[in-house]
Amino acid sequence: MTSLTILPSARRLVGRCRRVPVMPTGRKTRLSACTVRAKHGGLDDSEFVSFKLGERQQVTGNTHLYRFKLDDPGESINLPIASCLLVRARIGEAQEDGTKKFVIRPYTPTSAATAKGHFDLVVKVYEKGVMSKHFGDLKEGDELEIKGPIVKLPYAANMKKHIGMVAGGTGITPMLQVAEAILSNPEDKTKVSLIFGNVTEQDIILKKELDEYAKQYPDRFDVYYVLDKPGFFWKGGKGYITADMLKQKMPPPSNDNMVFVCGPPPMMDVISGNKAPDKSQGELKGLLKGMGYTPDQVFKF
């Protein structure tokens, strides 16, 4: 009898695939766990799966890139745009049974959706960040439970003529995901304008990638950096993001345009208002509302 070789990607699925009830013809059925994982490099949008940290690289003083390995080096996670992943760890408050509560946080991969054999998360360690501190303690070979993809805004090529982006700190990650998808598609003619706020020049993450996009696609992508504490020779924006900056760099209010916002809560509050406690979009407030944008022209990541 001929023996069969089971590929690494198949090993992850063996024994984990759930049966899906057979539905009458004409009714929609949910994809099985096997199908979802096969499509997304082992990721599952309905349950957490452990992935091993293969590499860790310092990006800035307190920010690192974490590269997680897929079982099959030929696979990709093929994330739909725009979507995120949920990360889970037992690092919360102690429970009566002696275990700690799960802490769950969303993160957007910075690697291309078609990257082979891995996906990258860029995480900044915050003093009061429970999950970010956990990332800071991770060593190569450690595992982390991850679930996804979780679609946040289904993007389609040319759905808007001009997309503005306002990002602060690690809020750049969903912006980069969308920009990469737009610019890598020659059929997508959407123009992208980004305002990216940080504290110091050293805090700017993924600057190399952003500058390369601006150089390679000068008619389709532009980026304007703003620093709270600029150096003496800094030539970009200074201070906080203002209404004048938004008027100069963002597309005007129009159903043909849209503005994405993502960053720390104080920035979100000023620019667009924060998301609601249930993570829905919440009320549009702040500078963008004052400039005449409507809720359907702004999306908060």
Image: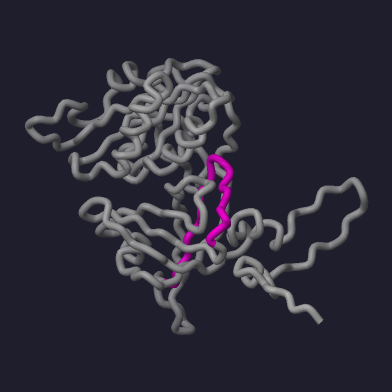
Residue 91 in view here: yes
Query: Residue placed at 56% from the left, 53% from the top?
Result: 77
Colour setting? one colour
From this view, report whether residue 141 is shown above or below residue 37. Answer: below
**Residue reaching furthest to the left:** 232
From this view, report whether residue 16 is shown above or below residue 299. Answer: below
From this view, report whether residue 74 is shown above or below residue 99. Answer: above
**Quarter location, residue 259:** top left
From this view, report whether residue 131 is shown above or below residue 91. Answer: above
Query: Residue placed at 35% from the left, 25% from the top?
Result: 222
Q: Position of residue 28 (x, y in %)?
A: 82, 48
Residue 294 in view here: no
Query: Residue placed at 61% from the left, 60% from the top?
Result: 44
Q: Position of residue 242 (x, y in %)?
A: 27, 25
The verdict on residue 15 being magenta is no
236 or 10: nearer the eye? Answer: 10
Residue range highlighted in magenta: 73-90
Q: Position of residue 234 (x, y in %)?
A: 14, 30
Q: Is residue 101 left or right of residue 296?
A: left
Q: Is residue 29 left or right of residue 61?
A: right
**Quarter location, residue 274:** top left
254 or 268: nearer the eye? Answer: 254
The verdict on residue 75 being magenta is yes
